[in-house]
């Protein structure tokens, strides 16, 4: 089934650790996005990509980095996790020729 | 750039009553306006959208109206039910390529 997948769904990790949040989509979408969201609060765009080897920073300053080596895969990496990174991270994708944007189920990150 | 405002931030209605959420946007070039519903612990999901070439769109109990001159659009939910309780986000975008700009969200509570 065409969908967006995120792993892990929940992660508790200590300060200073390096983590990678995985996002994959099987919809063949060109555009992919990462949002940071505290539960029920605003959606903050932190990174986006319009295609392979294209990555841009979003509106919210973030200490994370992303890569887009394959169309379907858009991982987000935190080199050194801090308690201020505790949040939910939502991946999304959108076709270049259509309007709708679809969200993944999210990763709930807690940094202790 | 685009700026989207959303009101009210919280809304409580009695079951069976109607609910209206209003968004305003700043960029007259925006021409696609989706609405997302996010239930507690779930991902945002598209519930209805409207393009700038129409003034109103309806899908069962939900409808969206668009006033391009005033640069605002509204979500109308009739005969509200407890399962309508969620956070609702509006967004604005240009059809071709522009990222979505989301409003800050409205927390709707439908009281039994």
Image (tube, grey):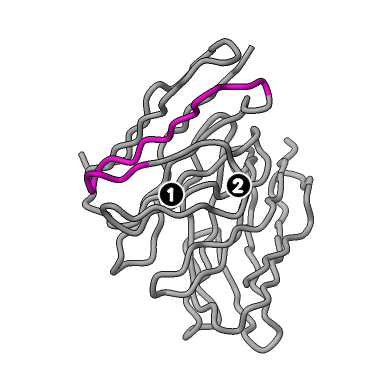
| Disc 2: CA contacts within 10 A as few (<14), some (14-19) or many (>=20) | many
Nearer-the-camera pick, A43 or B71: A43
Vertical placement of residue A42 versus A11, above or below? below
Which residue is rendered at x = 50% and y = 28% of the image?
A: A78
Q: Is residue A44 left or right of residue A53?
A: right
- Kindly indicate whether the residues beneath marks 2 and 1 are on one polypeptide chain: yes
B111 to the left or right of A25:
right
Say left or right for A23 vs B42.
left
Residue picked out by circle 1: A33
Q: Quadrant of the N terminus of chain B?
A: bottom right
Q: Could you tell me residue B6's position as x and y percent?
A: 72, 61
As for residue A60 lying within the magenta part, the answer is no
Q: Distance between the residues labelled 2 and 1?
A: 11 Å
Q: List x then y, in percent, for residue B111.
A: 75, 38
The answer to whether residue B43 is left or right of residue A104 is: right
Chain at tag 2: A
Magenta highlight range: A67-83
Q: Which residue is drawn at 42% across and 35% down?
A: A76
Q: Where is residue B28 drawn, in percent x and y?
A: 60, 84
Q: In this view, does B28 lie above or below B90?
A: below
- Secondary structure under badge 2? loop
Along the viewing direction, whichever of A29 and B108 lies nearer the viewer: A29
Which residue occupies 64% across, 72% down? B73
| Helix, strand or loop for the magenta stretch, by majority | loop
- Depth check: give the residue in front, A84 or A36: A84
Front label number (2 vs 1): 1
Q: Which of the labelled discs sits on residue A43, or is there none?
A: 2
């Amino acid at each position: 089934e065409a969908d967006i997948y995120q792993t892990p769904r929940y992660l508790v990790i200590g300060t200073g650790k390096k983590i990678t949040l995985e996002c994959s989509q099987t919809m063949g979408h060109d555009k992919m996005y990462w949002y940071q969201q505290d539960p029920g609060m605003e959606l903050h765009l932190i990174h986006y990509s319009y295609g392979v080897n294209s990555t841009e920073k979003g509106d919210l300053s973030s200490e994370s980095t992303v890569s887009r080596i394959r169309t379907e895969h858009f991982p987000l990496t935190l080199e050194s996790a801090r308690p201020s990174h505790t949040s939910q991270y939502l991946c999304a994708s959108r076709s270049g020729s259509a309007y709708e944007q679809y969200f993944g189920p999210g990763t709930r990150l807690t940094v202790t | 750039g685009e700026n989207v405002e959303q009101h009210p931030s919280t809304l409580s209605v009695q079951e069976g009553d109607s609910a209206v959420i209003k968004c305003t946007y700043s960029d007259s070039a925006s021409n696609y306006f989706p609405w997302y519903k996010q239930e507690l612990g779930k991902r945002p999901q598209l519930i209805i959208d409207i393009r700038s070439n129409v003034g109103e769109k309806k899908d069962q109990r939900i409808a969206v109206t668009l006033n391009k001159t005033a640069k605002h659009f509204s979500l109308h939910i009739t005969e509200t039910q407890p399962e309508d309780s969620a956070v609702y986000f509006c967004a604005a975008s240009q059809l071709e390529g522009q990222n979505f700009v989301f409003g800050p969200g409205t927390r709707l509570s439908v009281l039994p």
